[in-house]
Image (cartoon, grey):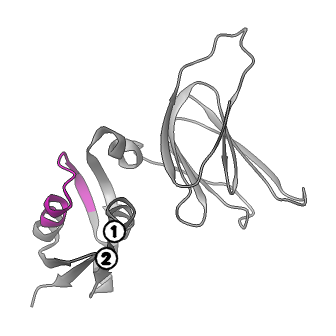
Amino acid sequence: MRVWLEGEALFSITRKPKYDSRTFIVHTPDGNVSVLGTEFSVNTTDGRSRVVLKEGSVRVNVQDSLGKKDLEYVMEPNQMALFSQNLDKIEVEQVNPEVYTSWASDSLVLDNTPLSDLIKRIEFTYGVEVKVNNKALLDKKLTGRFKNLNLSFILEGIAKTLNVDIEKREQKVYINTKN
């Protein structure tokens, strides 16, 4: 089975019997992810593709249109792979997969997550633009779990945790340091 993805999706693929030779492949603009019975997420919204493996095994393959580049990496659980047609390698790091998959279970998990990453998630999920007046805030790391995905609830939690003022006007959110 083949899927072409632009955006983000969470997949949970049942392990195939040994006699079944079918492979599940997710095609992204940057490469392919071949599945070997697993749970993983794929995101293509940041100008590159990101795969986070929760359990099982997947193979990431990147080829350029001229056939000059042929990169491949078999992922293990709790790994994140970042790849692009423009990169000469597949970047891999250890992560907490819940940070990248919790949205599918109506919660938001942060694990030493920079505010800059959380802002990207908020902008993507809620279709708002977030402005921060103090760029030093972007490096602040947050840990916790939001079981309520209401944007106002999340913004209130950020405001209390970082001791900042947050104002939402139409489709813009402003995060300002307190005077």
Q: Which residues are magenta?
A: 142-157
Residue drawn 53% across and 65% down? 46
Residue drawn 60% across and 49% down? 5
Where residue 49 appears, as percent x and y from the top left, is 60, 56
Vertical relation: 106 (above or below) 63: above
Vertical relation: 142 (above or below) 38: below
The amino acid type, in three-letter code, at marker 1 is Ile
Q: Is residue 102 visible?
A: yes
Where residue 40 appears, as percent x and y from the top left, is 51, 38
* Residue at numbered disc 1: 119
Q: Is residue 54 visible?
A: no
Nearer-the-camera pick, 166 or 168: 168
Residue drawn 52% across and 55% down? 7
Vertical relation: 39 (above or below) 32: above
Vertical relation: 147 (above or below) 35: below
Badge count: 2
* Earlier-in-chain disc, 2 versus 1: 1
Task: Based on the picture, tell me whether residue 150 belongs to the magenta stretch.
Answer: yes
Q: Is residue 25 left or right of residue 160?
A: right
Which of the numbered marks, if any, corresponds to residue 51? none
Q: Is residue 40 left or right of residue 159?
A: right
* Residue at numbered disc 2: 130
Place residue 153 in its image quadrant.
bottom left
Label 2 close to label 1 by CB (< 8 Å): yes
Q: Is residue 54 left or right of residue 84?
A: left
Q: How far, Cα to Cα, is label 2 from label 1? A: 7 Å
Q: Secondary structure at mark 2?
A: strand
Tell me the quadrant of the picture where the N terminus can be found: top right
